[in-house]
Image (cartoon, rainbow, N blue to C red):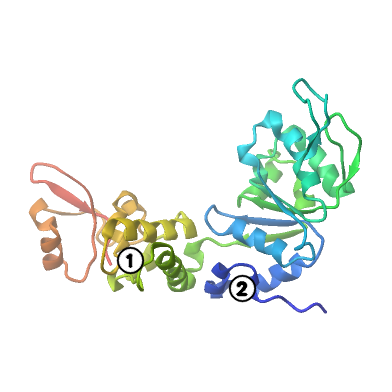
Amino acid sequence: MTPLIPVSAFSDLFRYTPSLESFLGSAQRAALSEAPLLVLGEPGTGRSTLARGLHAVSGRAQGPLVEVDISAIPCTLFESELFGYEAGAFTGAEISLAGRVERAQDGSLLLDHVEDIPWDAQPKLLRVIAEKRFTPLGGREKPADVRFLGIGSEDLPERAAQGSFRQDLFYRLEVVTLRLPPLRERRSDLESLMDFFLTDLQQRFGKNRLAVTPTARAWMAEYAWPGNLRELRNVLERSLITQGEGPLDPPCLIVAVAAQSPCTRWRNARFSLPSLTPVGIRAGLPNCWVSVARHSGKNGAGTIFRRR
């Protein structure tokens, strides 16, 4: 039996996600096969990082990893980008150009945003996956020694069931499906992930050891994080850039998304505006962290959205 490669081979990021330890073990076993792999999840959960790691621990690691962001390719150019074309295949095609499939020979082809594959091109991609052959525009059929990795949205199975994505292509891609849970479903990883991002930011910005205030950590543990890991990193980096010296206090910079906080006890509580100064808040609500999203009315009433 082939021994599993250490989790850190995927990415340093996954050393800080203890809740995914068993998940990553399954992912490594899947990576060692030649079957197509489909990574599903919300944006910002680390799907691309995981997919690159799957290639890095696979038997094709010495071959190329060719990435295709399908959402960035116009529908009219998708087939020529994917399969390439021969000189004279269409007006303006003065020279032959290898497509992404050909460039990925002996390696892996990573298709990001698979839900955006144009409908008319889906049968052709299905044939490449099933028969390991493709045909450049205006050219002859060629072999495709390529391993397919796909990244898609969580609702891809529903799209296939509803007919907005071809079911036969979906079933070809989902031989092994790996779902990365959102950050709100693995809050136990939050502290270690914060430490990982702080260490990275510390090195990038040449700072001494960075820290987050205990109050901010408590608030962040309750926040829903709709942007997942990407939002967590952005919040910490924004705090570092705008706050200056001292422990980071990210919640003071997230007033715009205050209404998404899971804390509701003090939501819509109304106080006079003078009491909502930082001094007034701490004096009147010493055990709470609050942010004011708006104020209105004759006496300047404010709305508190969030508490520690």
Residue 12 lies, in percent from the top left, at 56, 70
Looking at the picture, tell me which residue is in the foreground, 170 or 230: 230
Front in this rendered view, residue 213 or 219: 213
Based on the displayed image, in which of its 4 quarters is residue 261 positioned? bottom left
- Earlier-in-chain disc, 2 versus 1: 2
- Relative depth, front residue between 73 and 187: 73
**Residue 168, can we see it?**
no
Q: Quadrant of residue 254?
A: bottom left
Q: Position of residue 265 (x, y in %)?
A: 27, 62
Which residue is found at the position 17% from the left and 70% from the top? 286
- Residue type, mark 1 in image: Trp
In the image: residue 207, left or right of residue 47: left
The type of residue carrying mark 2 is: Ser
Query: Answer yes or no: do the residues labelled 2 and 1 have beta carbons within 8 Å?
Result: no
Image coordinates for residue 25, horizontal then vertical, percent:
68, 74
Quarter of the picture holding the N terminus = bottom right
* C-alpha gap between disc 2 and disc 1: 29 Å
- Disc assigned to residue 142: none
- Against 120, residue 190 (above or below) is below
What element does badge 2 sit on?
A: helix
Q: Relative to 159, is 202 on the left or the right?
A: left
Residue 241 drawn at (x, y percent): 33, 57
User: What residue is at 34 percent from the left and 51 percent from the top?
Assistant: 257
Residue at label 1?
Answer: 219
- Which one is closest to the eye, mark 2 or mark 1? 2
Mark 1 packing: few (<14 Cα in 10 Å), some, or many (20+)?
many
Residue on which disc 2 sits: 8
Q: Determine whether the residue tagged by mark 1 lies in a helix, strand or loop.
A: helix
Q: Is residue 92 left or right of residue 199?
A: right
Q: Return the residue found at the far top.
A: 91
Asked if residue 8 is positioned above or below residue 256 in the image, the reply reads below
